[in-house]
């Protein structure tokens, strides 16, 4: 590139390690590989399509090309005048490509914002603002490309899209959710500073863009392994299952789990597989560690909750502030603990004095999410909002009828207790927590506590 190379381009290349720079600079020649040796000085849309088109819809490829061709290498940002505009005869220069690669793979939110602006606009040289609708359209193309990469590059981690929800609907839901984080002007427009603030706060924008560029242009950098967007899935009978989640919704929900919950997801209950039985559901929940509950009501709305602790049958609330409620359809949203109370989780069965069922948030009779022990009925009586999670009504009707349900174990199961797998023999009160809870609630003294055999480490 020699002395003619701009200072801006040199600074961009300096962001990469010495061993990475030939890879970045080699992308231009690689894209021109289909030119039959008659290497020109620019990249055409057709050349870009031949590379990126394998992992992205054509509309996304055109957005990327339009963005690249509008970059002023001297200013290192897409121009407002569109001098090197979309589909112009000059195409994309080597300098424009390097600036684009540096800003997408190593850039700041400030540097990525003009790129997103250019990719969201319908034509080069448009006004220096975009509407939320234009950003949604850009995000739909971007998310579609990411899903395509996961599917075609074998990064599904055991998930089976053909046995899950509609991907195209999930793409729209995830794009809408990401766009909902924007803070547009009163007129509904977004300028570059608005996009910069959004990119800084919503990390998926940069993450997805990075993945698209790295995979579409085959830029393999030594210290940047491909991000894992889906949790591992194990022990799932896919032939018999139709999962309530789709791939984009899973991409949204998985990062919401607290740090450290990276264990493989395991299906422990499904009405499709195990029938509509509260007892069977409780058996699936017990001793599984953290779980994710998914419910679809007869109105077609999908919602649920994350339980940070393994569930216990007892007449008291349990869990901690890492629990949350969420909706998948008609909108992707997460509702975290407000700190107002500690009514995070509740599970009770076969008692006359306390409500029997599963609840999350709110209070007895007015839960953010409630499933009655008479399986098939529930409520989300949270108007205006659930006190525990700040969530609105999750279901189509406040008193809903269950259509289907799944429970996924999403964390490390608790260690086996004494009496399990070779441990010491347990009291009947340990085996049956309902009996123990009943003893506690009636004020009975547990005399057998003092008559147990001494523990091995206390002898």
Image: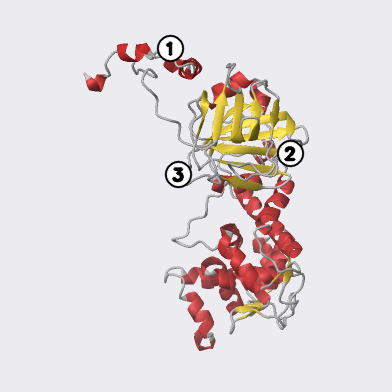
Select label 3 or label 2 by which is in front.
Answer: 2
If you read the primary sequence from the N terminus, does the residue marked by circle 3 or circle 2 appear first?
3
Q: Position of residue 215 (x, y in %)?
A: 58, 59
Q: CA distance from mark 2 to mark 1?
A: 41 Å
Q: CA distance from mark 1 to mark 3?
A: 34 Å
Q: Residue at x 71, y 54 (%)?
A: 176
Q: Is residue 395 above or below residue 70?
A: above
Is mark 2 in CB contact (under 8 Å) with mark 1? no
Residue under label 2: 301
Q: Secondary structure at mark 2?
A: loop
Q: Position of residue 124 (x, y in %)?
A: 74, 76
Q: Specify whether 133 is left or right of 195.
A: right
If you read the primary sequence from the N terminus, does the residue marked by circle 1 or circle 3 appear first?
3
Q: Which mark is residue 108?
A: none
Residue under label 1: 428
Location of residue 302 (image quadrant): top right
Q: Position of residue 99 (x, y in %)?
A: 57, 75
């Amino acid at each position: 590139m020699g002395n003619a190379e701009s200072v801006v381009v040199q600074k961009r290349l300096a962001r990469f390690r010495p061993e990475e720079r030939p890879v970045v600079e080699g992308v231009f020649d690689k894209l021109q590989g289909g030119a039959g040796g008659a290497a020109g000085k620019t990249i055409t849309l057709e050349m870009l399509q031949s590379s990126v088109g394998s992992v992205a819809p054509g509309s996304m490829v055109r957005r990327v090309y339009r963005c690249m061709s509008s970059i002023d290498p001297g200013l290192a940002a897409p121009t407002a005048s569109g001098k090197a505009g979309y589909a112009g005869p000059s195409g994309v220069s080597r300098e424009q490509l390097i600036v684009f690669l540096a800003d997408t793979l190593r850039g700041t939110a400030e540097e990525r914002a003009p790129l997103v602006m250019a990719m969201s606009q319908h034509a080069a040289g448009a006004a220096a603002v975009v509407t939320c609708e234009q950003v949604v359209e850009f995000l739909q193309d971007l998310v579609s490309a990411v899903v395509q990469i996961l599917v075609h590059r074998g990064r599904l981690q055991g998930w089976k899209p053909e046995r899950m929800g509609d991907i195209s609907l999930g793409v729209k839901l995830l794009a809408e959710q990401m766009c909902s984080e924007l803070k547009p002007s009163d007129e509904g427009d977004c300028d570059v500073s608005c996009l910069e603030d959004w990119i800084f706060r919503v990390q998926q924008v940069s993450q997805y863009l990075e993945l698209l560029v790295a995979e579409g242009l085959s830029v393999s950098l030594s210290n940047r392994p491909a991000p894992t967007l889906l949790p591992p899935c194990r022990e799932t009978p896919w032939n018999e299952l139709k999962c309530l989640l789709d791939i984009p919704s899973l991409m949204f929900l998985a990062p919401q789990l607290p740090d450290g919950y990276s264990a493989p997801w395991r299906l422990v209950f499904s009405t499709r597989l195990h029938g509509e039985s509260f007892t069977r559901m409780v058996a699936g929940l017990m001793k599984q560690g953290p779980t994710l509950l998914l419910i679809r009501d007869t109105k077609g709305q999908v919602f649920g909750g994350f339980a940070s602790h393994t569930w216990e049958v007892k007449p008291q609330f349990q869990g901690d502030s890492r629990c949350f409620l969420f909706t998948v359809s008609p909108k992707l949203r997460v509702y975290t603990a407000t700190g107002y109370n500690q009514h995070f989780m509740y599970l009770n069965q076969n008692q006359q004095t306390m409500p029997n069922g599963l609840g999350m948030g709110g209070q007895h009779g007015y839960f953010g999410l409630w499933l009655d022990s008479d399986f098939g009925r529930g409520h989300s009586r949270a108007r205006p909002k659930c006190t525990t999670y700040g969530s609105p009504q999750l279901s189509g009707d406040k008193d809903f009828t269950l259509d289907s349900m799944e429970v996924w174990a999403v964390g490390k199961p608790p260690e086996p207790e004494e009496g399990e797998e070779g441990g010491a023999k347990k009291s009947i009160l340990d085996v049956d927590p309902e009996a123990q809870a009943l003893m506690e609630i009636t004020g009975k003294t547990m005399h057998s506590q003092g008559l147990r055999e001494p523990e091995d480490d206390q002898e």
